[in-house]
Amino acid sequence: MTIDELRTRIREFLAANDPATTERLEFLRARYDAGLAWVYFPEGHGGLGLPHGWQPEVDQLFEQAGAPDNNPAANVIGLGMAGPTILACGTEEQKKRFLRPLWTGEEIWCQLFSEPGAGSDLANVSTRAVRDGHEWVVNGQKVWTSSAHLAQFAILLARTDPNVPKHRGMSYFLIDMTQPGVEVRPLRQITGEAEFNEVFITDARVPDEQRLGAEGDGWRIANTTLNTERVAIGGRASARESGLIGVVTDTWRANPDRRTPELHDRLLRLWVDAEVARLTGLRLRQKLAQGQPGPEGSAMKLSFARIAQQLSGLEVELLGEDGLRYSDWTMVRPERVDMNARDAGYRYLRAKGNSIEGGTSEILRNIVSERILGLPAEPRTDKDRPWKEVAR
């Protein structure tokens, strides 16, 4: 199929499904069934097997026609992490069951990976899943869980075999968040909001058909998810001088009386860094269109975190005493994070989390050094020891 044939197909779809008169959910379901949701996904799963790079134009054509979107900001984990992982590692039955309602927004997803004792060292997860016939019984605690209070399902990493080394004893599950035994508590952060949650799991059950991949293959599948997540955080498509660099340069232009040579030098350096990161992200997305995400996403996410923290600090300095004001400390549970729509104080505080979420900057430096630069791995005394014998 050529791009012109795809445009024709979209026009024909819109003629048969008028966005002005078709109910929103009915329209989204029809779009998925027509292969015009993720056009780069396989046929039968919301796509047509077309190049990944064609997706932005598809979305733009639907937007220009006044078509409803699937509210992607409310289901970032589902669309950006769960969906690609289910496509890459799931069975046909799992793809048919989960991908359609995930894309239409009927089912919101969250990510149950990090734990109080397994953040940077994710392979140290202690949440247990024990087989009971055709089900798994899950017990444990997860933390830093975005959208858990809204989610119907979660991607879950749990330990199924404590008798083998930590990287080999985990399995990957798709768990129902609405069942008894799953308790979600808000986790208030430095901004005052409860953007994240703690999740306590007590005797929750997961059918074995909702295990993704083979038993014990959880670490490999989790890395598929993490690579996708880091690209999503650090490699988003953007225009020149958009995002936080655009906010800070606008502040610079609006406050000529507060400029100093030192601030000017820092701003120019960060402008160049932001543009280099933007262009590198464009190259990475072009590469991803030809295959699976690799460790390069870790470098992009690492760069994104550094630039965001330095820019937000520069903005506060530029604003002087005005930068110390904080608009609202009300405890809310937001559905999305929009740093650009808030004040400088919020941006400064929220950016502190950029070097933690999606993999800490320290861990990402290890990934870059070992998997991209080929440097020797750091010594690990627990590498070949059974997980249950490792001191914690």
Image (cartoon, rainbow, N blue to C red):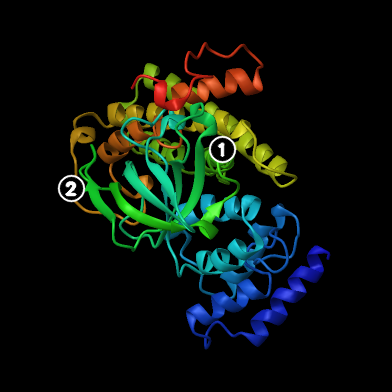
The residue that disc 1 covers is 223
* Rendering coords of residue 88 (x, y %): 65, 50
Badge 1: how crowded within 10 Å, few (<14), some, or many (20+)?
some
Q: Nearer the viewer, residue 305 or 210?
A: 210
Residue at the image point whose x is 68% and y is 80% from the top: 13
Q: Nearer the viewer, residue 319 or 199?
A: 199
Residue 264 visible to an observer of this rendering:
no
* Rendering coords of residue 198 (x, y %): 28, 45
In the depicted structure, whether residue 64 falls above or below residue 369: below
Residue at the image point whose x is 33% and y is 22% from the top: 392
Residue 352, numbered label: none
Residue 13 visible to an observer of this rendering:
yes
Residue 328, numbered label: 2
* Left or right of 31 in this view: 335: left
* Rendering coords of residue 154 (x, y %): 43, 54
Which one is closest to the eye, mark 1 or mark 2?
1
Residue at the image point whose x is 33% and y is 27% from the top: 313
* Rendering coords of residue 391 (x, y %): 35, 19
Q: Nearer the viewer, residue 200 or 24?
A: 200
The quarter of the rendered structure image containing the N terminus is: bottom right
Badge 2: how crowded within 10 Å, few (<14), some, or many (20+)?
few
For the residue marked with disc 2, what is the amino acid? Asp
For the residue marked with disc 1, what is the amino acid? Asn
Circle count: 2
Q: Residue furthest front?
A: 133
Residue 132, by quadrant, is: bottom left
